[in-house]
Amino acid sequence: MKETSLNTIFNIYLLYPIDRDDEGNLYRLLKNYTNIGIELQAYLLDWEKMDGLPKAYLYVPADHELFVHRTYKDKLLTKEDIDFINCKIIKECDLLVYFGNGYESNKVARELECANSEDIPIYTMPDLSPHAIQSLRLAIILILKSKEV
């Protein structure tokens, strides 16, 4: 966890597939997964208030990253550059939440590999069911307890 002047921040990287769906619709996929990021952030805020968990920062890749999209489109950044930056962000996280449908693109596989190589815990979240949400909460509590030792 990262210490700030105000308090401790628990950093979470939300990993989700962003390849095109069966109909080639990238926007709909991004929109659906961005909503998942918003819902998860709401739970994190509630847990901070109700359970005394630390303030959490949820990093949602490809959400409002206009700079990255434009520099990639203009060929100023390569896929490898973006992967390198994402891996640096993952290294600063306390947890990687993988919200996926079982399909692992090359991008997802690289980010999972980065988390594994840095010993970043990975929580595979199948959906936003109450059971999955409660399991995520417990995973965060276990990570926090392990860092106290």
Image (cartoon, grey):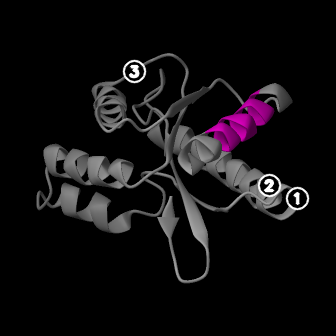
At mark 1, the secondary structure is helix
Residue 134: where, in percent of width, then height?
Answer: 80, 34
Along the viewing direction, whichever of 49 and 29 lies nearer the viewer: 49
Report the residue marked by disc 2: 47
| Residue at point 25%, 54% (across, down) | 85
Report the residue marked by disc 1: 50
Residue 39: where, in percent of width, then height?
Answer: 73, 49
| Residue at point 56%, 40% (across, down) | 28
Q: Amino acid at mark 1?
A: Met
31 is within the stretch colored magenta: no
Question: Real-space Cα distance between discs 1 and 2?
Answer: 5 Å
Magenta part of the chain:
132-142
| Residue at point 57%, 65% (across, down) | 9
Lower sequence index among marks 1 and 3? 1
Marks 1/2 in contact by CB < 8 Å: the verdict is yes
Question: Real-space Cα distance between discs 2 and 3?
Answer: 30 Å
Does the image show residue 35? yes
Residue 97: where, in percent of width, then height?
Answer: 55, 37
Q: Amino acid at mark 2?
A: Trp
Task: Locate residue 33: give its quadrant.
Answer: top right
Lower sequence index among marks 2 and 3? 2
Quarter of the image containing the C terminus?
Answer: top right
Mark identifier at residue 104: 3
Q: Main secondary structure of the magenta part?
A: helix
